[in-house]
Amino acid sequence: MPAIFTVDPSSGVPIYLQVIEQVKRAVVLGALAPGEQLPTVKALAVELTVNPNTVARAYRDLEREAIIETSPGRGSFVRTGGTVHDALEALDAVVLRGLTDAVREAKSLGLDRPALEALVRKALDRWYSTNHQKEES
């Protein structure tokens, strides 16, 4: 399996949460298909240069959230039979985390709510331009 996971120890986000979010994102975007085997705990720990317990914790949490299934002796696999609703919830969680981090950072830099709302509108206008919306109509 090609390396699709990376971690940033200096990000302030715990490594196990970074792994969880990346697995969810990979599942939602189709980079990991239902039934596909994930790297072993040991292999991913070596690839990311992290403690195997960190990867094991991420896998346990992903299993608890029904994103993956673990079969003793076989490994961990992307759960099959998930619904579109499950995928959208996982995607929403990833996006909400990113937005929450951005809002927290803006607040810590002293931006007030109106200034942040203006920046969000600017970003939305850039990525969801009026021209693009007219093309869809």
Image: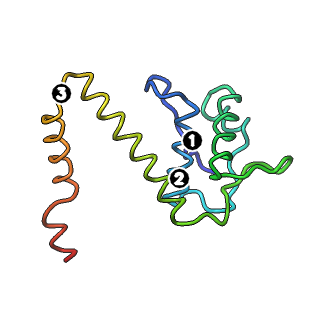
Lateral position of residue 44 relative to residue 99, left or right: right
Lateral position of residue 97 relative to residue 116, left or right: right
Earlier-in-chain disc, 3 versus 1: 1
Q: Position of residue 73 (x, y in %)?
A: 86, 47
The residue carrying mark 2 is 26
What residue sits 31% from the left and 29% below the top? 104
The residue carrying mark 3 is 111
Residue at the extreme bottom of the image, as rendered = 137
The scheme the figure's colours follow is rainbow
Whole-angstrom CA distance, mark 3 to mark 2, is: 33 Å
| Amino acid marked by disc 2 | Ala
Quadrant of image for the C terminus: bottom left
What residue sits 52% from the left and 36% below the top? 18
The residue carrying mark 1 is 20
Residue at the extreme front of the image, as rendered = 113
Camera-side mark, 1 or 2: 1
Residue at the extreme right of the image, as rendered = 73
| Amino acid marked by disc 3 | Leu
Q: Is residue 111 above or below residue 18?
A: above
Q: Position of residue 28 (x, y in %)?
A: 51, 57
Nearer to us in this view, 36 or 57: 57
Nearer to us in this view, 80 or 33: 80
Q: Position of residue 79 (x, y in %)?
A: 67, 58
What residue sits 46% from the left and 47% below the top? 93
Q: Is residue 104 above or below residue 33?
A: above
Q: Is residue 27 above or below residue 109?
A: below
Whole-angstrom CA distance, mark 3 to mark 1, is: 30 Å
Q: Position of residue 15 (x, y in %)?
A: 55, 30
